[in-house]
Image (cartoon, rainbow, N blue to C red):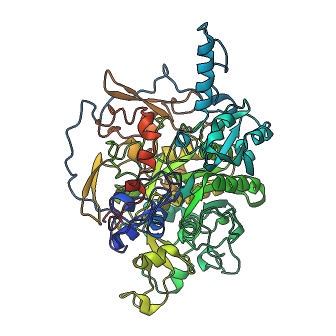
Amino acid sequence: MPGKHETSRNSSSVLKTTTWGAVIALTAAILVAGMIGLNPLSQPGDFGRPAAQVAEKALTPTVDSGTLALENSFGGEARHGQPVQGKALPSVSGTSPISASSASTVASTNHSNQTELSNPSAPGENNGSGSASAGANDEQRAVVAKIAPDLKGIDPEKAVEVIVQYKNSVGASEVAADGATAKAELPLVHAQLVTVKGGSLSSLAAHSSVAYISPNRMVRGSLDHVVTAVNADLAFASGWDGTGVGIAVIDSGITHGIYDLNTNDNSTSRIVYNQSFVPGDSSTSDSFGHGTHIAGIIGGNGYTSETSNYSGVYRGIAPDANIINLRALDSTGASTDSTVIAAIQQAIALQGTYNIRVINLSLSRGVYESYTLDPLCQAVESAWRAGIVVVTAAGNMGQYNGAGTNGYATIGAPGNDPYVITVGATNTHGNGNQTSQSMTSYSSKGPTSFDHIVKPDLVAPGNGVVSRMSSTGNAIAAAYPALAVYPCNASRTNCGAQYGSARYMRLSGTSMATPVVSGVVALLLQQNPSLTPDQVKARLMKTAWKNFASSTSAKDLGTGVVYQIQQDQFAVGAGAVDASAALAGTDLAPSNVGAAKSPKVTYNSSTNTLSIVSDPSSIWNNSVVWGNSVVWGNSVVWGNSVVWGNSVVWGNSVVWGNSVVWGNSVVWGNTDGSIGDGQ
């Protein structure tokens, strides 16, 4: 919203857009949060989430705990001169020791479903107990371990869609004996989408060929000052504009015929491919309004804003890149795991045809198991291994404190995967200066649930971002008309509907921040086409701007609540993306897959301290070039130590694998007024 800052928001577990702020600041109804990373309104609760999430909430009263949602935010958060005082901190301080401990290194995540999903003991083995009953118990435990926690206790007579991952590509025919009906093949993750009764899940899991069963969870879909804040204007002046690089936008579709997404002479569309994966809907246009906004942040050339008397030029980060439009989110901004996986599969298949080097996923959902079991995480890893940089939203649950973690441990999937680049949202406070950035209250924070991966990896401007709007059937703009940005009079002293139709809108959320990083990736790959995904990730993390203050505060525009934000490693990651610095960098990480995997963090309860534990295959143990102090930089590494002694964060599956958190209507269906942090 004009003149508004982004407000802190909660993140969600539904697969949806991650947009947050503008919408919430405009209305008391909060859209579903967490999935899309877009946030039309910024305010506590839903406004800190993706705009698509917020919009979805307004458009659909209830949200399934399994829904994929866009990470979005619509508003902006206000930063004050002095941070709000919080509770006294435990003994862990901002200068707590951090060690890249080699003694407790994390097992390599260069995994496959075939080896990590099985019980250490084969079903029916004696297991050293000498008891047949012990073997039977082991077998039963092995079967239970193959079923996702959010499938436990389901009505045995209810037909449910599940994704069945197999240990290899064979064995799929076996499940038919248990009444399972195959609906779609998902070869990317050695899986099938099937329909089966709840009572047959155990029998299904008992097959030796079955690795893991999870529900077909729902998913939903974080420019005016953005370009200069990330130094993309300097990159543009040096000739880097994304030419020749293909970016797959897996979102709610992209409206056709938008001038900003044409070539500079306005003769040819740069949307070079369109396909819908939404069941029963072949349209690739954007009736929801999220995907078009995302595409504009990535590659809009600002044509309409330059020719129609707008108050600013709304150019994207890579204004000559090609866009591959893979529609996976429906008209409400929602989707499912299988739909998104199918779109990822197609992006890989089209990789050579359109030089697809980047996939943008401004969406997320809740985390129900380790990333090694999650089919959505397995899909993004497959794209990464195929040579495609996957950029995904962190989520908009930073304001959520329902589990007592002050927004920590709320990173959504697939942003919890250590391979991909996960992006949080900053607020530029209406300025185009890199140094004006501070974290938004709604941006989700690490470490990740279950695996305790250090996330996000990077942050970027995501509050109150102006980009192209879908001109026809835009559900977000229809529900929240104040998000629209109108042209002005000739002197640009007055703007409004009397001077023409709105062609842009202002949204907030990690959904908006994600395409900023995707655009920067395109610039880097235009300059250095031979870079691998891990080399790109490492370069961006090392060259990120790291000079955040140890803390800041943000005011929720909807409620007036002021949030204290610890700008520690779990909030800002390696720092704010810097296009110019990345292009000027020369350090080259190893090219192997996993070289830049995000590290884990361990908690020592006896000393109340945290340590970073890098994977042996990664570069983070090399203190000369890629060590912790070089990449993360900030001496105030950890924030509120109250979290670190909390069993909620450190492995309590009862909380983080439970719909109490990820299916909570407080998170996904908050009806507070507006979202966004103030400027």
Front-most of residues 370 and 548: 370
Quadrant of the image occupied by residue 509 = bottom left
Most foreground residue, 263 or 656: 656
Q: Is residue 537 left or right of residue 554?
A: right
**Number of marks drawn:** 0
- 360 over 99 or under it: above or below: below
Q: Residue at 68% across / 42% down in the picture?
A: 164
Measured as percent of width and height from the top left, residue 328 is found at 63, 61
Q: Position of residue 651 (x, y in %)?
A: 43, 32
Which residue in the rendered view is the most extreme toward the top? 130
Q: Is residue 663 visible?
A: yes
Foreground residue among 157 and 396: 157
Q: Nearer the viewer, residue 219 or 77?
A: 219
Q: Is residue 76 above or below residue 168?
A: below
Location of the N terminus by quadrant is bottom left
Q: Position of residue 346 (x, y in %)?
A: 73, 56
Can residue 316 be spotted in the picture? no
Q: Quadrant of the C terminus?
A: bottom left
Residue at screen point 41% across, 27% down: 99
Relative image position of residue 344 (x, y in whole percent): 67, 53
Query: 597 above or below 668?
Result: above
Name the residue furthest front. 157
